[in-house]
């Protein structure tokens, strides 16, 4: 069991975490015809917009209430009202997802009351759904904003089924965590459909940010689960929550609609995928399709091939809590040692990381502790630390803005784990002869350990 240590620095020098509003906005983007709206200054929204555009390389729907200094002090009702009216009439959004920011949370704007006033004064907008989520960016992180937003969507938009409802045995609700890419969701959909289910993902980024080109331009989200499908989620026979932070959403769905759920804290690797497949077998009553048996065999062979290159390697990793737990335990099963573990926010799930200590810190902490490691794993902001330490960087998480295909990275399922092993092992193979600044590579008998420490060379 890992010990969780909270960093004591006065400020983040090189931030690892993304803010709560970013996580909330991304969750809203997995719903068709939606528009995320930041209640805050233009700078808050500009930062999020640039981050998403650089990561996904797509047009991103994101708007702001454009709070000025005066509006922040006096209250932001007029800004909220004007934003809702403009987005509804000009951009034809069917859902406006409002995420608070640090500026408006510090002031204490009562956005729920604002929404009631907008409803009273603009009855023509009755068909537009409004969902407000409190996501102050001065606390918690990306994963937490996603968690709160999905739970609030279920609370506000899912209809309570009738007492005599006949549940659809083929309908399966999937509540994916913030760490899963559109590529991951496509892989999960393929697996679930193989057992005869019709999966409904909430949110569904695979249909909105998967890189497709629409027939016509739309200012709102390009795809995703529809409002009608969300309303009927209570008729499903089962639900699956992926990631510990999705238990809140699953509990909300169970409380409102009585849908039973199964929580999977991990989805990367052989044993987690076996557990997922076993659950699908149990609730479907079907045997495992042949193609998945073959994919499992391929993964086992990849583990055998890859462990010669991953065994004994020291890893420094910086990710959100659930992603850190999942990926690090997968690497430990491949023979790696998690020497440095940095996360964004304290969570009970971090105690399950197979390392001595998890530090709640930033990328400066990762760089400070990483010398002597063989690989860094974090998002693209870790590239400078990688260059300074002369340790290769394996990019995971969000944002990844200096490589193409970030939205299609797939780590779940047998195929995802297989390809992840190959990708990581190939990094070790490509860098196996690169000297580290803190490593002694003797050239001749009698060389002192300090002789080459400051001058890394390749052999």
Image (tube, helix red, strand yellow):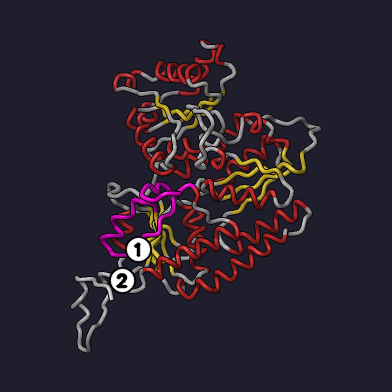
Task: Determine the residue positioned at 43% across, 30% down.
Answer: 62
Q: Nearer the viewer, residue 223 or 229?
A: 223
Q: Which residue is mark 1?
A: 392
Could you say whether the residue bearing mark 2 is in a helix, strand or loop? Answer: loop
> Against 119, is 361 above or below?
below
> Against 211, is 131 above or below?
above
Taking the magenta stretch, the answer to whether it contains residue 406 is yes
- Answer left or right for 254 relative to 395: right
- Answer left or right for 368 relative to 35: left
Q: How many marks?
A: 2
Task: Determine the residue positioned at 37% across, 28% down.
Answer: 40
- Answer left or right for 176 relative to 59: right
- Residue at the extreme front of the image, as rendered: 215
Taking the magenta stretch, the answer to whether it contains residue 23 is no
Q: Quadrant of the C terminus?
A: bottom left
Mark 2 vs mark 1, CA separation in Å: 10 Å
Q: Hey, which quadrant is residue 31 in on the image?
A: top right
- Answer left or right for 386 relative to 88: left
Q: Residues within 10 Å of mark 2 (few under 14, many from 20)?
A: some
Residue numbers of the magenta segment: 379-407
* Mark 2 touches mark 1? (CB < 8 Å): yes
> Against 173, is 113 above or below?
above
- Residue at the extreme bottom of the image, as rendered: 445
Q: Residues within 10 Å of mark 1 (few under 14, many from 20)?
A: many
Task: Determine the residue positioned at 62% across, 38% down.
Answer: 252
Of labels 2 and 1, earlier in sequence is 1
Q: Where residue 15 sits: x, y (%)?
A: 33, 48
Q: Which residue is mark 2?
A: 434
Q: Where residue 178 sits: x, y (%)?
A: 50, 45
């Amino acid at each position: 069991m890992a010990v969780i240590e909270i960093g004591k620095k006065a400020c983040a020098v090189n931030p690892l975490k993304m803010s709560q509003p970013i996580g909330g906005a991304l969750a809203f983007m997995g719903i068709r015809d939606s528009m995320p709206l930041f209640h805050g200054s233009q700078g808050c929204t500009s930062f999020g917009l640039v981050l998403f555009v650089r990561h996904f390389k797509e047009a991103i729907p994101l708007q702001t209430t454009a709070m000025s200094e005066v509006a922040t002090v006096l209250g932001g009702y007029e800004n909220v009202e004007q934003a809702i009216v403009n987005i509804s009439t000009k951009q034809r959004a069917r859902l406006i997802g409002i995420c608070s920011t640090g500026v408006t949370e510090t002031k204490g704007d009562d956005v729920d009351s604002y929404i009631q006033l907008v409803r009273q004064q603009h009855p023509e907008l009755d068909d537009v759904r409004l969902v407000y989520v409190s996501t102050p960016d001065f606390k918690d992180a990306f994963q937490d904003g996603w968690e709160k937003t999905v739970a609030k969507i279920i609370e506000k938009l899912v209809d309570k089924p009738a007492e005599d409802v006949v549940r659809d045995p083929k309908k399966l609700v999937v509540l994916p965590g913030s760490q899963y890419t559109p590529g991951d969701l496509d892989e999960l959909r393929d697996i679930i459909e193989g057992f005869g289910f019709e999966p409904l993902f909430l949110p569904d980024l695979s249909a909105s940010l998967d890189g497709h080109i629409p027939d016509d331009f739309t200012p709102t989200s390009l795809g995703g689960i529809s409002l009608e499908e969300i309303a009927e989620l209570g008729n499903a026979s089962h639900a699956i929550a992926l990631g510990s932070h999705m238990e809140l959403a699953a509990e909300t769905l169970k409380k409102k609609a009585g849908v039973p759920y199964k929580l999977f804290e991990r989805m990367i690797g052989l044993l987690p995928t076996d557990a997922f497949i076993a659950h699908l077998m149990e609730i479907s009553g079907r045997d495992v399709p042949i193609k998945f048996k073959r994919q499992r065999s391929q993964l086992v062979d990849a583990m055998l091939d890859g462990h010669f290159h991953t065994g004994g390697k020291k890893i420094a990793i910086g990710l959100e809590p659930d992603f850190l737990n999942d990926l690090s335990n997968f690497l430990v099963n491949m023979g790696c040692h998690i020497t440095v573990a940095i996360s964004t926010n304290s969570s009970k799930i971090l105690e399950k990381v197979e390392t001595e200590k998890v530090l709640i810190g930033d990328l400066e902490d990762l760089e400070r502790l990483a010398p002597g490691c063989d690989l860094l794993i974090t998002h693209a902001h870790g590239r400078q630390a990688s260059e300074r330490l002369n340790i290769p960087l394996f990019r995971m998480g969000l944002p990844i803005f200096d490589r193409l295909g970030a939205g299609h990275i797939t780590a779940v399922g047998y195929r995802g784990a297989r390809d992840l092993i190959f990708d990581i092992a190939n990094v070790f193979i490509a860098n196996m002869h690169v000297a580290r600044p803190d490593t002694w590579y003797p050239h001749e008998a009698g060389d002192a350990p300090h002789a080459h420490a400051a001058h890394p060379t390749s052999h």
